Amino acid sequence: MKTDDLEDLRKHPIGVFDSGMGGISVLRELVKVMPHEDFIYFGDSVNAPYGTKRTEEIRELTIHHVEGLMAQGAKGIVVACNTATSAAVAVLRKMYPELPLVGIEPAIKPAAVQNPGARIVVMATPMTIRQEKFQKLMAHYEDQIRIVPLPCPGLMEFVERGDLEGEDLRTYLHELLGEVSREPIDGIVLGCTHYPFVRKMIQEIVGDNVTIYDGGPGTAREMRRRLAQNDLLNPQQEQGQVTFYNSRNTEEELALCRSLFRA
Ligand code: DGL
């Protein structure tokens, strides 16, 4: 690439995609590690939840929206959705080998490294758990920790409604975690980017001795590494801008995005 083109490209925004509002938990981490970057965030709330859809449908939607972010000039893309990552990132990498592209997967590795022999519950969408990618990840760590996959259909919807601490959510989580809590839990992996927004209530229910793992910070660091490798970090000194788009482009939806970003 010519120096002028590279100089220009460094100033382009980073695109962040999720099926809805969940990826904002990753966006917050991205802004922490790269405060001078501009970001465009796109959430596909109209088609959410992805976690109960067929793989082909998730793949098509993800490719379409990632291409939309590229058309807006994104110099790199974070697929801030575990479900979309497992369904589409391998294909996207083949389609756009030059693009700095980072996906997210359940943070089983740090849970295994820090707790050998532990019993770890992985909360994720039914789709993420069914995918071969997850099954392989689980098999990889199975001789180091005991992994209990916990599909959570219906949980992301609370976040999409902005309900982060209501009584209905508490009842839902009590029921969901009741069965797996019969035996002691050492750690919980939040394998969906919506779940960090309800982390406080999960912690209240399982107690302070259970460590909760979120893949967001590691994903953000990985994106910074990839951009640095490609000499694509933005040299500007000012704080970057964050712009939100959503397929349900109402003022209410965008206001919820901004409030989750500050949460
Ligand atoms: N936020 C998404 C994830 O990380 C999934 C939510 C959904 O659309 O089901 O898997």
Image (spheres, grey):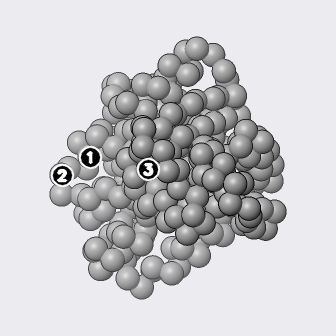
Q: Residues within 10 Å of mark 1 (few under 14, many from 20)?
A: some
Q: Amino acid at mark 1?
A: Gln
Q: Of the residues tagged 3 and 1, which is closer to the observer?
A: 3
Label 2 sits on residue: 208
Q: Residues within 10 Å of mark 3 (few under 14, many from 20)?
A: some
Q: Residue sitting at 63 percent across and 16 percent down?
A: 250
Label 3 sits on residue: 34
Q: In x, y percent, where is residue 245?
A: 63, 29
The secondary element bearing badge 2 is classed as: loop
In the image, 202: left or right of 193?
A: left
Are discs 2 and 3 less than 8 Å apart at CB? no
Q: Residue sitting at 60 percent across and 37 percent down?
A: 40
The one nearer the camera, 66 or 169, is 66
Name of the residue lying farthest toward the bottom: 143
Question: In whole angstroms, how far apart are the C-alphas of marks 3 and 1?
Answer: 28 Å
Specify whether residue 176 is in view: no
Label 1 sits on residue: 203
Are discs 3 and 1 less than 8 Å apart at CB? no
Q: Of the residues tagged 2 and 3, which is closer to the observer?
A: 3
Q: In x, y percent, where is residue 158?
A: 47, 31
Q: Earlier in the sequence, mark 1 or mark 2?
A: 1
Q: Residue sitting at 52 percent across and 34 percent down?
A: 242
Q: Amino acid at mark 3?
A: Met
